Image (cartoon, rainbow, N blue to C red):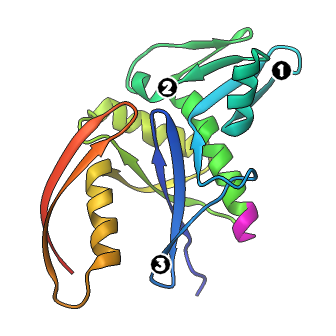
Amino acid sequence: MDKKVVIGIDLGTTTSEACIYVDDKYKHMKSPHGNIIIPSIVTFNEKTQDISAGEIAFNRAKSGDATSVEEIKRLMGTEKKIAFGSTEYSPSEISSEILKYIKTYTEEFLQEKVEHAVITVPASFNNNQKQDTKRAAELAGFKVERLVAEPTAAALAYCMENTKGDDFVKLMVYDLGGGTFDVTVGEFHK
C-alpha cells in the first residue's frame, strides 16, 4: 500500500511555511532559496505576463519590477477582485499561487507528488473565509484533509513533540501573527 504524503501549511498573512511529519518528527520544507519561511506575496510582471510567488515575488515587488499583492489573506471570503494586467483574480486565486509555489518546491524536495494538505486558518475565520482557503488549495492541486485553527495547530505540534506516553498538558498558545491575534487554551492527553 502506498503511503499518503500530507503536507501541513501555514498560509500566513505576511509569511507562509510548510512541513511534513515523517519518522515521528516534523521536517520543514525549504524553498529553492533555502528558506523555510517564505513571503506571502504574489506579483504579476506586465512585460513577461508571468505570475510569481514567494521570494521571487518579494524581490520583484521591492525592485518595482511588477505589480504586487500582499496580505491577500485579509481579503479571503470577500467578493473583491484584484487586477493583474487585463485579468481580475479572486483572493482565492491569488492565494493559490502561494500554495502552488509551496507545492512545487515540496514535490521537488521529496521527489514525489504531494496531493493532500492540512492548512491552518485564523481561529476567527468565518465559513466564507474557510471556503475561500479550501478553494485556493484545490486550485493549487491539493485535496484539503482539514482546516485547523492556527493556535490549535501550534498547540498540537508542541504536544506531539514534547509529550510522551500518558503525559497530560495544560497550555495556552498565543498566535501573534502578521495579521491575526488568536489564543487557544487546552488540555492535551497524548
Q: Is residue 159 left or right of residue 179?
A: left
Tell me the kind of residue under disc 3.
Answer: Lys
- As drawn, 162 above or below 102: below
Q: Place residue 49 in its image quadrant.
A: top right
Q: Which residue does the image show at 82% across and 14% down from the upper left?
A: 46
Q: Which residue does the image show at 23% across and 41% down from the upper left?
A: 182
Looking at the rendering, in which quadrant would you find the C terminus?
A: bottom left
Q: Is residue 74 left or right of residue 48?
A: left
**Marks 2 and 3, the one that precedes in the sequence:** 3
x and y, in percent, of residue 17 in the image: 53, 51
Which residue is under mark 3? 25
Tell me the kind of residue under disc 2.
Answer: Ile
Q: Are there few (<14), some (14-19), or many (20+) residues within 10 Å of tag 1? A: few
x and y, in percent, of residue 104 in the image: 71, 52
Which residue is under mark 1? 49
Which residue is under mark 2? 72
- As drawn, 181 above or below 1: above
Furthest residue to the top? 86
Question: Magenta part of the protein: which range?
Answer: 108-112
